[in-house]
Image (tube, rainbow, N blue to C red):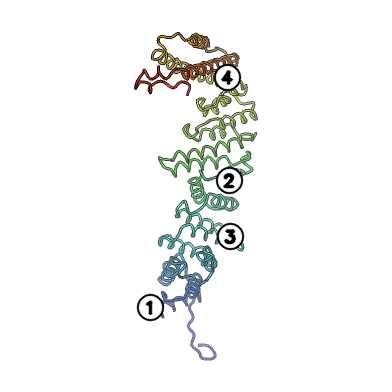
Amino acid sequence: MDETKDLKVLFHDFDDGAEGFELVAARFCHNEKSLDCISFWTWSELLVALKECQDLLSTSDSSLILEKILDCVVTRLASLVVASPCTCSSENTRISWWFEDLLVLKIDLIDKVIRMSISRNIDHAMISKFLLCYQRSRFLTATPTEKCKIMEVMINLLSLLDRSSFSCKLLFGIFRVVSSLKISSHHKSILENLIGSQLDRATIDFLLVPSSRRKGYVYDVNLVLRLVKAFYIEGRCFVLASRLRKVASLVDSYLVEVAADCHLSPSKFAALVLVLPDDARESHDRLFQAIDIYLEVHGGLCEAKKMKICSALNYAKLSTDALKHLARNPKFPSRIAIQVFINQQSKLENLFEDKTHLVDTFSSSVFAEESIDEKVSSDQVLVYAKRINLPNKAEHLDVQLQAMQCTITELEKYCGIMQTQIGNIPRTRLSSLGNNARFLPKLCS
C-alpha cells in the first residue's frame, strides 16, 4: 500500500512483463465462446488484432486466439474478389489488394499465414508474388540478421509451392540476393534444387555467376555442376528428352563462355564436358568448339589431360566440317585424329555397301537384258574405295580424308546418272512389272 493508501500488487520477475500480464488478463476475461464473434469482424479489425497478437504472443507457441484470427484472415483471402474492400477496375489490383495490408507483419507470422494459405489451396502464383513483394518491402529497413531470416523463410515457403507458380528469373534473383547474405547451407541447397528443377528454362546470362576471389577462375563452375545434378535429381529416373536437349544446349553455351578462362583447371573443365550423358546432345559441334577454345588457351596440357577432356566427344555426332577441322587440328591428341579417321572410314564403307546393294538389286530386276555403261564407273568407284587403307601415321590423315571426299563426290555423281536413267525408262516397261513396280528401290533419296 503506497502513501495514497491504494492497494498495489507487485509481481517480481513476471514472464514477459506488462505485455504478458495483459495476455493473462485477456485469457481470463474471454472464454472460448467469445472467440466465435471473430468471424464477424471486419478486415480492418482482423488486421489490428493480428498485429496485436504478433506483439503480445510468441508466434512459435500455439495460441487459440491467434489460430482463430489466422483462420478468419486466410478464409477472407480464399475469397479475394468477393471480400475485397477496394473497387479497382484492374483485375491484378483486385486480386492483390491484401499485399500491402500484410506487409506490416513480422516474418514468423507471415510464415504461418502462407502455410495456412497453401493448405487452403490459395493460388500458388499469387503467393509467390506476395513473397517477392514482402521481401522487397521489408529489406528497406531490415538488419542483416533480419534479411537472412526473411530469405530463409521465403525459400522454405517457395519449396512448398508448385514449380510452375514462379519463374526461373525469380529464383536467380533470390540467389543473387542471398549471395551477399550469410544464410545457412541447408537453405542454399534448397534454393539450388529449386533452380535446378527449372534449369531448362534458364538462359546463359543466368549461369554466368562470378566465382569468389579465392577460387581463381572467373565464373562459378561448381554452381553449374550442382544445378545440372539437381536437374537430374528433380527428374528422378525420367527426364523428358526435350527438356534434356535444352539443358544440353545451355551447358554447351556455358562451356564456350568459360573455355577462354586461363585459370579454369583441366579437372573442372573435364567435369563440365562430362556432366551430361551422350544422349543429351543431338550434335557435338558446340562441345567440340568449346574444347577447341580450351585447348587453344591451355596449350601446355599433357596428352592424358587432353584425352580426358576429349573423351566426351562422340565423333558420330560431329558434322563433316567439324571432323575435317578436328583431323587437321594439332592441338588435339594424335590418337583423336586416328579415331576420327576410323570413324569416317567406317561411314564410307557402310555407304558403299548400301549403294552397291541398291545398284545390284535394281540392275538384276529391271536391266538384266541391257548393258549399262555406268556399271564400269561403279566398279571404278568401288575399286578406288578399296585402295583407301588405314594409315599408320597421323601425318597421312589429311591426304586420306581428301581421297575419301573425292570418292564420295564420284559416288554422288554416279547416283545422279542412275536417277536420270530411271527417269528415262518407258512406262510400258515399268508397267510390265505389275504390282512389283512399287517395290523398286529409291536410289539416292
Marks 3 and 2: in contact by CB < 8 Å?
Answer: no
Helix, strand or loop at label 2? It is helix
Measured Cα–Cα span from mark 3 to mark 1: 40 Å
Comes first in the chain, label 4 or label 1 = 1
What residue does disc 1 label? 31
C-alpha separation, residue under disc 4 versus residue under disc 3: 57 Å
**Mark 1 vs 2, N-terminal side:** 1
Q: Amino acid at mark 2?
A: Phe
**Label 2 Cα crowd, 10 Å radius (few <14 / some 14-19 / many 20+):** some
Q: Is residue 212 above or below residue 394?
A: below
Q: Amino acid at mark 1?
A: Asn
Residue toward you, 185 or 122: 122
Mark 2 and mark 4 residues within 8 Å of each other at the beta carbon: no
Query: Closer to the camera: disc 2 or disc 4?
Result: 2
Q: Secondary structure at mark 1?
A: loop
Give, as a three-letter code, the residue at label 4.
Ser
> Which amino acid type is shown beneath numbered disc 3?
Arg
Separation of disc 1 and disc 2 at Cα?
55 Å
Query: Which residue, given by chain and number where applicable, does mark 4 sit on?
Result: 334
Residue bearing the label numbered 3: 136
Which one is nearer the viewer's eye here, 311 or 342? Answer: 342
**Residue under pointer 2:** 206
